[in-house]
Amino acid sequence: MLSMLSTRVFLPLTLLTTTLLTSISCIPTISTNPQSTFDTYGPVAESQLVLFYWILGAAIFVFVAMTFILLYTVYKFRRKSDDEIPEQIHGNKKLEIAWTILPCLILAAIAVPTVLTIFDNTNSPDTSSNSVTVDVYAHQWFWEFKYNHPSNETEKITVANEMHIPVGKVININLYSDDVIHSFWIPKLAGKVDLMPGNNNTMWLQADKEGVYLGQCAEFCGVAHALMKFRVIAESQEDFEKWLLAQSTEAIETIEPQALEGKEIFESRDAGCWSCHTIRGSSRSKGKTGPDLTHIASRSHIAAGVIENNQQNMTKWIENPNSIKPGTLMSTNGQVYNDPDKKLTGPEISALVAYLRTLK
Ligand SMILES: [Cu+2]
């Protein structure tokens, strides 16, 4: 009898418990991942994690309870002889009411904290002048962040793919898209909230520790969706203000001959870079299709967080952006923009790179 019990009941139960325990003990391993939501650094991500554990707890409770009842029933009410018919319970009112009400209670226990968390994550706790507001614009397939100008109220400062924020402060975020639906997600800080054409969403976040947090578009938005990354740099208030001031200036004028030549090519009719990119301070480069390049040399990565920003990578990017980011809307592929039969030459690309690297 005991040996039968142990194979039929205890063995499956042991297997079940081991599976559950190993899946739970995986969690600390996942947290070493830079995009892990189990390792939070701000109040919004934390409230989302608490909610996740709450729902996971409810799910584990349902799973264990149901498995136990199922195993018990299978054992207890098994057919004991060939001519036996089990007790019929069809139409049992008490049972019907119990298994209607119980799931409702469980769902309510999940719904209440879920709805409260959604409201908390949408409504910023601080909209005073002490907080910082960033307008986030998603594009296929890069990000732009607009900040209020430190000294000019009517002007905004545009930067791309790297969002600086002061640590420990509430950051209010407005989300916009002009093409398709994207989703703004910084796993360790906050998200995911969609950016919808024609319907602007808001959210807020706060980073409790200085550092670089990885972000990622979390809504499939086309071929290069997986390569639509960004970085959030949380730094001291002082460093943030210094950064914002530096970004608010126009592009630094260069006197270096190769860089000057690069500027000419950038603004030439043939290369056409100016028609898609803005470089503040240049009278010609005012394009809006691509990222703002006014201070491109101050960014750690290019192509929406995909490759490091260094001379070699910048050269490769201008030579053939498609080889780094298939489908990218910077579709020059090294071709001279206005003439498909001509290509940018090696020295021309070097000059362009020299120019872009002066834009600190
Ligand atoms: Cu996407």
Image (cartoon, rainbow, N blue to C red):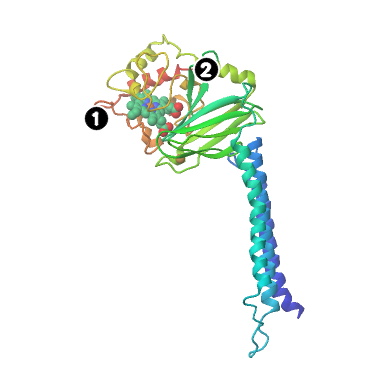
Q: Position of residue 357 (x, y in %)?
A: 45, 19
Vertically, is 244 above or below 313? above
Query: Who's the residue at 29% across and 29% down the image?
Result: 335
Question: Label 2 neighbourhood size at 10 Å, few (<14), some (14-19), many (20+)?
Answer: some
Q: Nearer the viewer, residue 93 or 298?
A: 93
Residue occupied by mark 1: 340
Residue at the image position 66 percent from the left and 46 percent from the top: 113
Mark 2 sits on what residue?
149
Residue that lies at the very extreme toward the right in this rendered image: 2
Question: Image quadrant of residue 276?
Answer: top left
> Tag 1: residue type?
Pro
As helix, strand or loop, the secondary structure at mark 2 comes to loop
Q: Earlier in the sequence, mark 2 or mark 1?
A: 2
Residue drawn at (67%, 57%) of the image:
105
Report how far apart the C-alphas of labels 2 and 1 lie in the structure: 40 Å
The foreground one among 319 and 181 is: 181
The answer to whether 326 is drawn above or below residue 343 in the figure is below
Identify the residue at horizontal 67%, vertical 62% (top origin). Answer: 102
Q: Secondary structure at mark 1?
A: loop
28 or 244: nearer the viewer = 244
Determine the residue located farthest toward the top in the rendered image.
Answer: 255
Q: Quadrant of residue 263?
A: top left
